[in-house]
């Protein structure tokens, strides 16, 4: 791996990130084509059904692709779907070398694109900036390898870990810039997961508001291109009615229930009947996650109360979390951050790896991965 390889792959990763608001359920992929010392083509995958990154970069490079080196963040696809197989397109372009950051995580196709390229006499190198490339698509990778979605838990609390006063008042703990920061993460998710309790308490929209995204994002994506994540609401006891605002906003909503209700819902609302947990009336969260994965949902952003947060953590369904902490102290009679009970040893506590800490105006944002044992 040369310095040039790292430099060009870094550029491809930067390009891939440009699709993070629009590509789901497809992966984010970037591509750079270099001939001699010159970048002759660039591209990134924008949306499912649209040309892949390699195809766009080749269109830009045209004849200069012959004998060139192609840097791509994910192994070129080997199958025909809504687009042609990228491995074959690269072969036809007569490129000399392909550098892949990582192989395709889909077991059905992993390594096939690389084998096609090598059989055509093209040199292939794998693993340049692999960790950075994997970070582009945690949901896609988990879906392909475990048939489960990647789950990201969002939390907000005071410095003493409280989410609401004893009387239930919680608006607002964090400041407007922290709340705007949440829009950035919502926009990258396939779905937003919450509960009927949150809907009843707050009547939230649970959507992405284009006007609250950074100006650079607004310039890159017209409002018409904004993809609204699917709203998934756990409503085990059928407490919700069609009166709440989220059922009448653009985008799809799924009600996860233990039995189907008789209410008349807008066409954009589905009811799913799911099993309960063993010896419990609570909805089976593992069954829900499995069904969401089958539905094509790769990446779930969770915004809910302490009870669901605790249940997801205890069942080892959370992959990462983001905690916003405000410079406030709310006292011992205020409501706690996470409802986890029955712990008797420190070994039973969920263990986190802090990956980033920064200030969002006056609030602290902590990002962490969860060290699950599954």
Image (cartoon, rainbow, N blue to C red):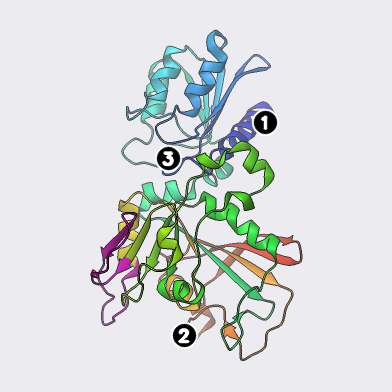
Q: Residues within 10 Å of mark 1 (few under 14, many from 20)?
A: few
Apparent side of residue 113 relative to residue 281 in the rendered image (left or right): right
Which residue position is annotated with label 2? 341
Marks 2 and 1, Cα distance to the nearest angstrom? 48 Å
Say if mark 1 contacts mark 3, CB within 8 Å: no
- Above or below residue 254? Residue 278 is below
Please state which of residues 359 and 209 is positioned toward the viewer in this rendering: 209
Residue 26 badge: 3
Residue drawn at the location 54% of the way across and 70% of the way down: 351
> CA–CA distance between discs 3 and 2?
38 Å
Query: Mark 1 sits on what residue?
Result: 7
Q: Check if residue 275 falls in the magenta segment.
A: yes
Secondary structure under tag 3 reads loop
Magenta highlight range = 256-285
Find out whether the residues at labels 2 and 1 contact each other: C-beta distance under 8 Å: no
Viewport quadrant of the N terminus: top right
Tell me the distance, in whole angstroms, between the alpha carbons under discs 1 and 3.
Answer: 25 Å
Q: Determine if the magenta segment contains residue 344.
A: no
Is residue 270 toward the left or the right of residue 303 in the image? left
Q: Residue at x 42, y 12 (%)?
A: 92
**Which mark is first along the chain, 2 or 3?**
3
| Horizontal side of residue 103 vs 173, given as left or right | left
Say what secondary structure mark 1 lies in: helix
Q: Residue furthest right?
A: 362
Nearest to viewer (mark 2 / mark 1): 2
Can you tell which mark lies on residue 294? Answer: none
């Amino acid at each position: 791996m040369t310095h040039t390889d790292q430099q060009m792959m870094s550029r491809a990763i930067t390009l891939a990130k440009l699709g993070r608001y629009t590509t789901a359920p497809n992966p984010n992929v970037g591509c750079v084509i270099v001939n001699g010392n010159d970048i002759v083509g660039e591209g990134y995958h924008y949306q499912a059904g649209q040309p892949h990154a390699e195809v766009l970069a080749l269109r830009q490079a045209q004849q200069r692709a012959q004998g060139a080196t192609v840097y791509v963040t994910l192994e070129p696809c080997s199958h025909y779907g809504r687009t042609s197989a990228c491995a074959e397109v690269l072969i036809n372009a007569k490129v000399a070398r392909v550098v892949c950051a990582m192989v395709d995580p889909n077991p059905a196709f992993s390594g096939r694109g690389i084998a096609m390229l090598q059989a055509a006499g093209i040199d292939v190198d794998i693993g340049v900036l692999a960790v950075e490339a994997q970070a582009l698509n945690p949901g896609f990778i988990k879906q392909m390898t475990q048939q489960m979605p990647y789950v990201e838990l969002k939390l907000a609390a005071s410095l003493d870990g409280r989410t609401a006063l004893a009387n239930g008042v919680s608006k607002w703990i964090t400041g407007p810039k922290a709340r705007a920061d949440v829009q950035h993460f919502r926009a990258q998710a396939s779905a937003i997961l919450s509960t009927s309790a949150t809907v009843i308490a707050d009547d939230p929209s649970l959507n992405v508001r284009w006007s609250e995204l950074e100006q650079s994002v607004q310039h890159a994506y017209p409002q018409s291109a904004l993809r609204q994540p699917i709203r998934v609401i756990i409503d085990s006891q059928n407490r919700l009615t069609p009166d709440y605002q989220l059922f009448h906003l653009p985008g799809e909503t799924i009600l996860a229930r233990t039995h189907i209700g008789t209410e008349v819902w807008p066409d954009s609302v589905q009811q799913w009947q799911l099993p309960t947990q063993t010896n419990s009336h609570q909805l089976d969260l593992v069954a829900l996650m499995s069904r969401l994965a089958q539905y094509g949902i790769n990446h779930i952003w969770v915004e809910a109360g302490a009870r669901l947060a605790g249940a997801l953590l205890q069942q080892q369904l959370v992959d990462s979390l983001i905690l916003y902490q405000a410079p406030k102290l709310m006292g011992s009679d205020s409501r706690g951050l996470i409802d986890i009970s029955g712990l008797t040893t420190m070994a039973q506590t969920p263990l986190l790896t802090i990956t980033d800490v920064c200030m969002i105006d006056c609030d602290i944002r902590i990002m962490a991965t969860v060290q699950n044992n599954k």
